Amino acid sequence: MSEGNVAASQLLQYIERIERLEEEKKGISDDIKDVYLEAKATGYDTKTMRAIVQLRKMNPHDRQEMDALLETYKSALGIE
Amino acid sequence: MSEGNVAASQLLQYIERIERLEEEKKGISDDIKDVYLEAKATGYDTKTMRAIVQLRKMNPHDRQEMDALLETYKSALGIE
Amino acid sequence: MSEGNVAASQLLQYIERIERLEEEKKGISDDIKDVYLEAKATGYDTKTMRAIVQLRKMNPHDRQEMDALLETYKSALGIE
Amino acid sequence: MSEGNVAASQLLQYIERIERLEEEKKGISDDIKDVYLEAKATGYDTKTMRAIVQLRKMNPHDRQEMDALLETYKSALGIE
DNA sequence: ACGTTTGCGCTTTAGC
DNA sequence: GCTAAAGCGCAAACGT
């Protein structure tokens, strides 16, 4: 087999690995969507839930600091 | 002039209009970046500023409602 | 247990399911990134690989049609 | 006037400058969208137009190189 | 049914 | 240079 075919075969393997992983990723994305839909059907607000998920990603200290700073700026600008 | 050339000329005009507008847009994006940099140099936190800009886009009523709901969820989950 | 706590517990369960799924998703995203890095280290161009992945998502007919249209526009505008 | 108020006033000025610029930027984005819509109404394919705009951003040499590489990969993978 | 709003993936851009 | 974030078009979904 020529070098070209070796390279082609290797490239194809990379591509196919990526495609498999992307499929898996898509499946999980769909699962996440389903959970949100279920929560919504139960009466929860998904937008707020998404905000919560973001907040919980941060460590408590950073979150509180960020929050405090935001409050400071809001006060300074008269945002209630 | 053939029909093909007429069409080509028209297509080119659309493309060039878009390109001009994109240039303008780029200029403004750069201006925005500059303001943030200037504010940062003055001691402001740009991430918080960006959050403020977002908040001010909303109307007060919606913002308060969103905020109240978020507080409710945070309390329920013990997020301080 | 009060209704409020029931609701809180349910909300927490939704949030935690989402967090678990997002972790999995993140893991797979990292895997994809790794494959691209590995391919890059082998000498492949990742930008082109991403284009290939996109092309392979399309059905052949659509892809050829898209390609033909692009060629038409390029010719019309003198893009070589 | 207290220092706090000075700072608040300055912060407000930065925020308002940003908001003005973002409004302008939004206006231009809308203009761009309008041009695409107009072109579409005339019979042009906007997706292809966007691809053309991207191509014209590149210098000819890079574009040809990119194109050649893509063709190489397509051949290697039997994409017609 | 419609049309506005929301979510999602991707690309591009900004910040460290 | 790389990781994180924004912007964008597209698609789906919800309420009207």
Image (spheres, coloured by chain):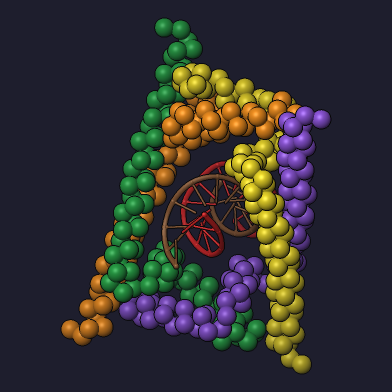
Chain colours: A purple, B green, C yellow, D orange, E brown, F red
Residue farthest right in this picture? A1
- The image shows residue C27 at horizontal and vertical percentages of 71, 63
- Is F3 positioned to the left or the right of E14 in the image? right
Residue farthest top in this picture? B1
Q: Quadrant of the C terminus of chain A?
A: bottom left
Residue farthest bottom in this picture? C1
- The image shows residue A59 at horizontal and vertical percentages of 57, 80
- The image shows residue C13 at horizontal and vertical percentages of 75, 77
Picture layout, residue C47 above or below residue C8 = above
**Depth check: A61 or D75 in front?**
D75
Q: Is residue B51 visible?
A: yes
Picture layout, residue C13 above or below residue B41 = below
* Residue D45 occupies quadrant: top right
Q: Is residue D37 visible?
A: no
Name which residue lies at 65% across and 29% down.
D72
- The image shows residue B14 at horizontal and vertical percentages of 42, 28
Name which residue lies at 74% across and 71% down.
C20
Q: How many marks?
A: 0
Name which residue lies at 53% across and 30% down.
D65
Name which residue lies at 73% across and 45% down.
A14
Picture layout, residue D32 above or below residue B57 = above
